[in-house]
Image (cartoon, rainbow, N blue to C red):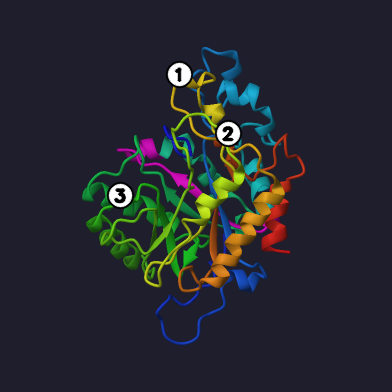
Amino acid sequence: MRVTVLCLAALALTAAAPRGGTGAEAPSEAAASGRRATVGAYYFDGWAGRHREAATADWAAHAPTHLTKRLREEFGDREPLWGWRDDSAEIMQRQIRLAADHGIAFFAFCWYWHDTARAIREDPKHTGLQLFIEAPNNHRMRFCLLIANHAGFEIKGEQAWRRTADLWMPYLTHPQHLRVGGKPLLIIFNAGGGDKAGFAHLQQAARNAGLPGLAIAACHPAPPDIGYTHTTRYNAVPGWNKGRQEHPYRELVDAHKASWRGTPDRPHIPCLSVGWDRRPWEPADPSKGRCCWYYPDRTPEQFAAALRAAVDWVEKHPDQATTEMMILLYAWNEFGEGGYLAPTKGDPDGAYLKAVRAVVAP
């Protein structure tokens, strides 16, 4: 998810008994489907809308909001097989087929706060979410929301958080919404920006809508006593803003593995990055802006081994993981930051997707 701009039909998830409940647990959705784990991917909705330079630069005339000239010209191997734009019903249906065919159980769509309902409705970064809701094949996957409440999109104060109940309830009550322990899942990117009274209002609004409450996951770290029920990450990147240095992918994997820990009272959803290399969103001259370490040596085999370790972790740590054995991947389509599963010109056969299927749904 870019730092400046980070970045819902028919069956519900099989509801597993919440931890601490009595009686026998229902089989998880993963087990019922034959998958080893319930693996989802973050979906960054930056590939729609009109580029800010569309009227002044020829290369940007038909570009989506988050395409950069450097990404287009120097990292063209990252272009998806369907092109840089994904804002059509046909392309969304294609993405659902690809993801579902390869063991991806859900998308976690980035959602952005604005001060007015109109601005929220018109934000092009919500295009993919709406296309998923409208897709005739969305019964093949679940979805949830990652609330991207970072700089520029902060939800500030109890009253703003209370307003989110009306905005999110149509998604949370949608039959395809992802559930954890029987409750719809919300993921909060900036966990420190949560609000205790606002979360209490969200929980009551969910109960008023006929839901058993909400599972609210904090992207690490989770402040105590606000109302978070789970923890997770968006990603874990060593070397953030520490200058442009090349590092091996194994270091990125190790950083994620170190974050896999939960408790019986607050289970953890482990996250794993498919990759990280945000040079297309950095200046070509590293002395002219903030730059990060990057990990260009990733391979499908390395990624498969790391995903196998994540599946092993949820299998071996039932006291720390969710009963659904849930795992999150960064990401489906973070092309600018180098974390993507979607097939591209550089990966036309979808080797990373095939790696997911081989591990999760052999």
- Category of crowding for the residue at label 3, using alpha-carbon neighbours closer than 10 angstroms: few (below 14), some (14–19), many (at least 20): some
Q: Which residue is mark 1?
A: 288
Q: Which residue is mark 3?
A: 192
Q: Which residue is mark 2?
A: 246
- Category of crowding for the residue at label 2, using alpha-carbon neighbours closer than 10 angstroms: few (below 14), some (14–19), many (at least 20): few
The residue depicted at 43 percent of the width and 33 percent of the height is 241
Q: Secondary structure at mark 3?
A: helix
Separation of marks 1 and 3 at Cα, in angstroms:
30 Å
Q: Of marks 1 and 2, which one's residue comes earlier in the chain?
A: 2
The image quadrant that residue 61 belongs to is top right
Say what amino acid the circle numbered 2 marks: Glu
Say what amino acid the circle numbered 1 marks: Lys
Asked whether residue 118 is drawn in magenta, I would say: yes
Say what amino acid the circle numbered 3 marks: Gly
Q: Of marks 1 and 3, which one's residue comes earlier in the chain?
A: 3
Asked whether residue 190 is drawn in magenta, I would say: no
Q: Is residue 274 visible?
A: no
Place of residue 248 in the rendered image (x, y in percent of width and height, measured from the top left): 61, 41
Extent of the magenta region:
100-120
